[in-house]
Image (cartoon, helix red, strand yellow):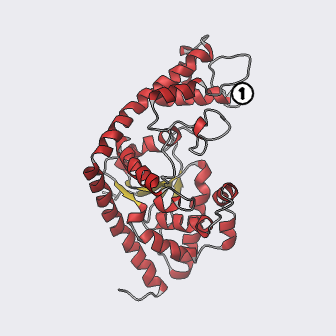
């Protein structure tokens, strides 16, 4: 019997998880744990390139652990852990800092983006974060790293760093492949359908723990289109706002675009937008309830992330020892 391939993914707890994250990667992760040996982590070390409120960060990390489980990730079938609980991430991150070139780091779009938004705090971590991200990945020798189209650059620089290191010291790191899921919606902002839904623009973003009345309000205010046709039709170029809502409704209900167009034929946007809101409320209701239940069971959550850190550390430290030996560091 062939061993399962390894897959790894992490999300920063720099804000609340939102509908775009859920309908994009997160909803499909439970299916992947049957096929792959999966590691899922809260990338809390990455959050501090931007100043954080400590109490809020702690709360978001624990909420994210609970949400992962509530969305269907079984801790018995995959490894769920908090990045800062595995010291090897920071240790290998420093090593890979020394094998990441200034020029390639300066070309990273996330650095340019965050530097423009946080001009009073353009710190070294903001510049060198790709080396830590490479460490996050390479420690677990994964075959695949799930990414969106907009994140391929992160895997590419990881591959470059790994190949550079391997070129000097031999085959130390497995070179990971980016895995772009064929399923998973790319959800756009409700108030700007030309931009991806993002926690940095809260008015156009729906958070997983948002109250039903707030979800409905945001959908009723969602941008549609200024065309005179005013019909519910999937046409991303001509009708990006309505097409985004159709995609959300399809993901929430399992209906095809054709079925949705027939369902709302002749009804206009006034009926369609509240229907999308109601479908999303019902989709999120069990996730919200289970998240609240898990957050109330602090002992269980702690057992999950401690067991996850123990398992992750075993794999990560094996890779780190190999790296240290190649570098010539004296063994403990």
- Residue 159 seen in render: no
In the image, residue 258 sits, relative to residue 148, either above or below, namely: above
Q: Quadrant of residue 314?
A: bottom left
In the image, residue 267 sits, relative to residue 316, either above or below, namely: above
Q: Position of residue 247 (x, y in %)?
A: 56, 30
Taking depth in this image into account, of 255 and 112 the one nearest to the observer is 112
**Mark 1 nearby-residue class (10 Å; few <14, some 14–19, many ≥20):** few
Residue 205 horizontal side relative to residue 85, left or right: right
Q: Quadrant of residue 4?
A: bottom left
Q: Secondary structure at mark 1?
A: loop
Q: Position of residue 242 (x, y in %)?
A: 63, 26
- Residue at left offset 44%, top offset 50%: 60
Taking depth in this image into account, of 169 and 291 the one nearest to the observer is 291
Quadrant of the rendering where the N terminus is positioned: bottom left
Taking depth in this image into account, of 134 and 272 the one nearest to the observer is 272
- Residue at left offset 30%, top offset 40%: 293
Q: Residue furthest top?
A: 266
Q: Quadrant of residue 320?
A: bottom left
Q: Position of residue 233 (x, y in %)?
A: 63, 21
- Residue at left offset 56%, top offset 37%: 205
Count numbered badges in the picture: 1
Quadrant of the rendering where the C terminus is positioned: bottom left
Residue for badge 1: 238
Q: Position of residue 319 (x, y in %)?
A: 41, 73
């Amino acid at each position: 019997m062939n061993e399962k391939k390894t897959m790894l993914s992490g999300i920063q707890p720099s804000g609340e998880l939102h509908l775009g994250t859920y309908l994009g990667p997160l909803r499909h992760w439970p299916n992947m744990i049957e096929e792959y040996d999966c590691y899922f982590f809260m990338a809390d070390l990455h959050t501090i390139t931007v100043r954080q409120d400590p109490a809020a960060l702690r709360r978001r990390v624990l909420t994210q652990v609970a949400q992962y489980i509530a969305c269907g990730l079984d801790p018995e079938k995959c490894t769920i852990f908090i990045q800062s609980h595995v010291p090897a991430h920071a240790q290998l991150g420093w090593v890979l800092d020394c094998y990441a070139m200034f020029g390639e780091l300066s070309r990273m779009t996330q650095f340019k983006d965050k530097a423009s938004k946080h001009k009073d705090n353009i710190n070294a971590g903001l510049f060198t974060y790709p080396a830590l991200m490479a460490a996050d990945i390479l420690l677990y020798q994964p075959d695949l790293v799930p990414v969106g189209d907009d994140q391929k650059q992160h895997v590419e620089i990881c591959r470059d760093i790994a190949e550079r290191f391997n070129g000097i010291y031999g085959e130390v790191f497995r070179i990971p492949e980016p895995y772009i899921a064929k399923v998973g919606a790319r959800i756009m902002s409700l108030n700007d359908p030309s931009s991806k839904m993002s926690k940095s623009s809260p008015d156009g973003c729906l958070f997983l723990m948002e109250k039903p009345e707030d979800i409905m309000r945001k959908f009723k205010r969602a941008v549609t289109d200024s065309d005179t046709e005013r019909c519910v039709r999937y046409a991303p170029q001509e009708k990006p706002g309505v097409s985004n809502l159709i995609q959300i409704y399809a993901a929430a209900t399992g209906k095809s675009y054709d079925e949705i167009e027939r369902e709302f034929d002749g009804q206009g946007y006034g009926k369609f937008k509240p229907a999308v809101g109601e479908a999303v409320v019902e989709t999120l209701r069990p996730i919200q309830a289970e998240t609240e239940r898990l957050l109330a069971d602090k002992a269980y959550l702690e057992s999950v992330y401690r067991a996850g850190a123990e398992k992750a550390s075993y794999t990560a430290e094996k890779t780190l020892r190999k790296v240290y030996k190649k570098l010539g560091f004296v063994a403990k």
